[in-house]
């Protein structure tokens, strides 16, 4: 699955930053990938990380092994493992996370459960990531507009 968002348009052609699709896969398989490590990979390796499936248990394990090997090969350091959320908020279409409600209200939007449910898991993931403290939040309103939530 290759899904790029419009708010990522300034970097997806070159893949100079880690796109949401890859970040989604990393959270799914429990591996941390630093931007500095990403930038040591070839364009073909980055593109493969975008395109490789990471949905079924077998695909997730394969993706995990591939990214671990790639990070080790490129950096000489073993990949950092992250805890995998057993019930991630982006897969729960029934409850809008409080952080999303707060961020939405900051830009004058009331996000309903029906709006949240209509989003894809990747769209929900993107909004969650874009709403976290310490993240460059300028893309949150762009994502909201792109997802027809404004």
Image (cartoon, helix red, strand yellow):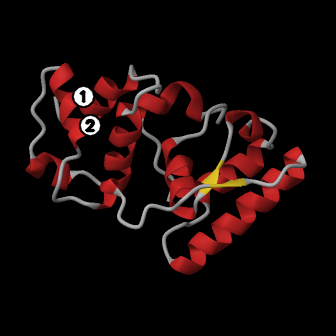
Labelled disc at residue 88: none
- The local crowd at label 2, few if under 14, some if 14 to 19, many if 20 or more residues have their Cα within 10 Å, is some
Q: Which residue is mark 2?
A: 99
Q: Nearer the viewer, residue 57 or 150?
A: 57
Q: Residue furthest bottom?
A: 58
Secondary structure type for disc 2: helix
Q: Position of residue 110 (x, y in %)?
A: 9, 32
Instruction: Give the side of residue 131 with respect to residue 38, left or right.
Output: left
CA–CA distance in space, label 2 to label 1: 6 Å
The count of marks equals 2
Q: Position of residue 62 (x, y in %)?
A: 67, 72
| Residue visible at 58% across and 28% down in the picture | 11
| Residue visible at 60% across and 52% down in the picture | 50
Quadrant containing the C terminus in the rendered view: top left
Q: Position of residue 113 (x, y in %)?
A: 11, 50
Against 119, is 69 above or below?
below
Against 32, is 110 above or below?
above
Against 77, is 91 above or below?
below
Locate residue 144: give its quadrant: top left
Secondary structure type for disc 1: helix
Instruction: Give the side of residue 58 with respect to residue 106, left or right.
Output: right
Q: Mark 2 touching mark 1, by CB under 8 A?
A: yes
Q: Nearer the viewer, residue 146 or 25?
A: 25
Q: Position of residue 129 (x, y in %)?
A: 41, 39
Q: Which residue is mark 1?
A: 103
| Residue visible at 39% across and 23% down in the picture | 137
| Residue visible at 73% across and 64% down in the picture | 66
């Amino acid at each position: 699955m290759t899904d790029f968002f419009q708010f990522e348009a300034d970097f997806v052609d070159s893949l100079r930053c880690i796109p949401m699709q890859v970040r989604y896969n990393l959270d799914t398989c429990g591996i941390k990938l630093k931007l500095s490590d990403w930038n040591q990979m070839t364009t073909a390796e980055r593109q493969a990380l975008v395109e490789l499936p990471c949905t079924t248990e077998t695909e997730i394990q394969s993706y995990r092994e591939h990214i671990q090997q790639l990070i080790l090969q490129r950096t000489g350091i073993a990949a950092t493992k992250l805890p995998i959320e057993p019930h991630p908020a982006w897969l729960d279409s029934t409850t809008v996370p409080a952080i999303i409600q707060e961020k939405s209200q900051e830009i004058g939007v009331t996000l309903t459960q029906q709006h949240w449910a209509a989003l894809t898991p990747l769209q929900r993931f993107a909004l969650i990531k874009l709403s976290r403290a310490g993240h460059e939040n300028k893309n949150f309103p762009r994502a909201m507009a792109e997802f027809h939530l404004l």
